[in-house]
Image (tube, rainbow, N blue to C red):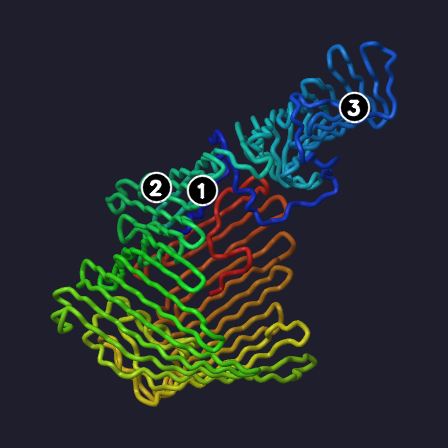
Amino acid sequence: MRNRRHSLACLAVLMANPCLAQDEAAETPWLLCRNPEFLPMFRELSATETTQDPPPADIYADTLDVSKDYETVFDGNVEMTRGQAWLTTDTLNYNHTTKLYRTDGLVKFQNESLRMTAQSAEGNQEQGSIVLNGVRFQFHESNGNGTADRASMQGGSGQLKNAEFSTCPVNQKQWRFRADQIDINQETGKGVARNAKLELGGVPVLWLPYLRFPTDDSRASGFLMPALGQDSLNGLDFSIPYYFNLAPNYDATLTPRYLSNRGFEIGGEFRYLLNRNAGQLEATYLPDDDIRGIDRYLLSWQDFTAINRSWYLDTDLNTVSDINYFSDLGTSIEETSTALLKSEVSLHGRGKYWNLDLSVSEWEIANPVQPVDTKPFSRLPSLSVFAGKPLKPWLDVGIYAEAVSFNHEELENGNRLDVTAYVRTPIKGKFWYATPSFSWRQTEYQLGDDLSIVSGGESISRGLPIISFDAGASFERITTIGESRFIQTLEPRLYYLYVPYVDQDDIPVFDTRELTFMWSSLFRENRYGGADRQTDANQMTFALVSRFLSTETGKERLNLSLGRTVYFVDPRVVLPLEPPPQGSGSDWIADASIRLSDQWQIGITQQWDPSTNSNELTSVRGDWSMSNGLQIGASYRYRRDFVEQTNVAFVIPVNTNWRILGRWDYSIRDNQRLESLLGFEWRSCCMGVKFYVADYVRSFNEPNNLSFFIQLDFNGIGNIGGQPKLFDENGILAY
């Protein structure tokens, strides 16, 4: 429900950890190093397992010497197999009495966990144990590799003595662990290093008495990397999560957290995946906040349950202790600007020609600047049904109905039933289409005592027809711009809408708001969202779209659109305190989407009010993305009397290993910086270092919050620290 905290981490904290389970290592987006010095897979692992216990042992060689009663000498291209274990060497001596063997010559060894080369080996073929000396090893399912003086293996598990481990190429050890002993457990897919030293660039930087790391992609319980940060509001911020691998289909994470200015917080998350449902539970608790003097908490539960192929249940419950929770404890502008929390439980049914949704929903104010009277009505419950079917290729019929019981602790309650039945006759030609439509909308209200006095009765009805005609065409031609050939389309569209005027001033407003005007608004049957107002209309929309498509690739390089609605009769239906629409029609709206190449894209939206000769909206956005990783995005947004903001974000690769990241959001209208970030990243295929400085608004009445972030990534092991969620792996979030 909310972003995870990303904060400054300290390597020294690891010294106190009894166990570090870095199961998030698999999420590292970098490609693993490719290096010819890595040990290749000597042979394919068997897809089947023998039922014999112990599994049979087989030895093959070019020649063998049986001159001794108790010993056989295998010589030349020796191969020994026992289950998944496989060994090859030049010469092998096998004692029939002791069941022991020893090798003479270099050894290649492979089992279900790893593969090795060794100077020599000896073992017990009957028991399946082996000891190898002078070892180089490589895990099958990870990039982990290293060396050891001695390796003792029993099946897929064993011990490595005086070992070193890394995920870097053999000749580029940017980091590695040196340990007295590394234990390998094939069943858990984990390795444990004891008395280990972390080296960066060959320099010892940290001693670790105990370190747990993955040898494959399986999960295991243990501590995750700790995080330590500094926040201008909360002070020192330290947390260390513990991961519980409870079962293959559910797990949990417990996160103790210390905030020096507030106290100790405990947080937890439980995830589950069952046959028919999946979900997660999240909770945090901060007792007796030292600043606020109250207990702080967050509770969240999301669940999806499939009842059968047609029906499913969706649960999304969220609550916080107080309206200042996110503004105090949020870590980004997305969190701190959270104004309302919604909790909803809904039952959904889907069929070929029908949909049904039954839900209950409740809202909670989660921001101190949010007025109480702006809190939406609760729906206790809401039932919506749709049924529609094409009877003929040229005839569609359908009906939509919604029944809602509205509840609000500060406002009067009421019930509403809204039903719309329609008939459409879509007609299509080779390059044109026309769709006449007729519908009837009937809305019934049952109101509480106070509302009934204002509205003139407990029951109110509204019924009216909605008539529309939508027609368009598409013309094409070949045109040339420079040396490039394009298919240019010309797509005119007319949309007529007629809705007679019905006085609706006595109808209360439960959930209805005027929708933001945009291109799709030109073709709506109602300029309001919600059923409490149905706009009257006698109007025609004129729209024109032109596209330029590459003749070589079919990709759209240019899209131009222009449209406006003309009123034959001025609309009269409005919301309370809303002035009626002015002028002879709607605003002009123009859109342009320009893709100069696969790397460049520009989008422009302009909205103009001809009655006042004023600019109502301007939106400009652009992206530039290159194959070398360079990304630049910028946007400008203006809506009269509401917002004027600009945004710039970039990722600049300096070279193969270094890149610079930045983001800047500024409110021109408020003359205030909303959010900014500057970061540097260095990464190779086995290690990365990231440093960020972030500054963002918690509240317009408070100074910006300044935070520092640092992250160390050990590919295949895990990371230390966190990263603000301002960027994703596919590009920068420019707008």
For badge 3, the amino acid type reads: Ile
Q: Nearer the viewer, residue 370 or 493?
A: 493
- Sequence order check: which comes first, mark 2 or mark 1? 2
Single out the mark in the foreground, 2 or 3. Answer: 3
CA–CA distance in space, label 2 to label 3:
65 Å
Q: Is residue 19 above or below residue 619?
A: above
Residue 420 showing in the rendered view: yes
- Specify few, some or many for label 1: CA neighbours under 10 Å numbering under 14, 14-19, or 20 or more: few
Question: As drawn, is 731 to the left or to the right of 534?
Answer: right
> Which numbered dot is residue 274?
1
Examine the image and state in which quarter residue 86 appears.
top right
Q: On the image, numbered disc 3 is attached to which residue?
A: 59
Residue 180's spot in the image, x, y percent? 61, 25
Helix, strand or loop status at disc 3: strand
Residue 347's spot in the image, x, y percent? 35, 54
Helix, strand or loop status at disc 1: loop
- Residue for point 66% across, 72% down: 553
- Residue for point 31% across, 59% down: 339
For badge 2, the amino acid type reads: Ser
Q: On the image, numbered disc 2 is attached to which residue?
A: 260
- Specify few, some or many for label 3: CA neighbours under 10 Å numbering under 14, 14-19, or 20 or more: some
- Sequence order check: which comes first, mark 1 or mark 3? 3
Verify CB contact (< 8 Å) between mark 1 and mark 3: no
Residue 368's spot in the image, x, y percent? 26, 57
For badge 1, the amino acid type reads: Leu
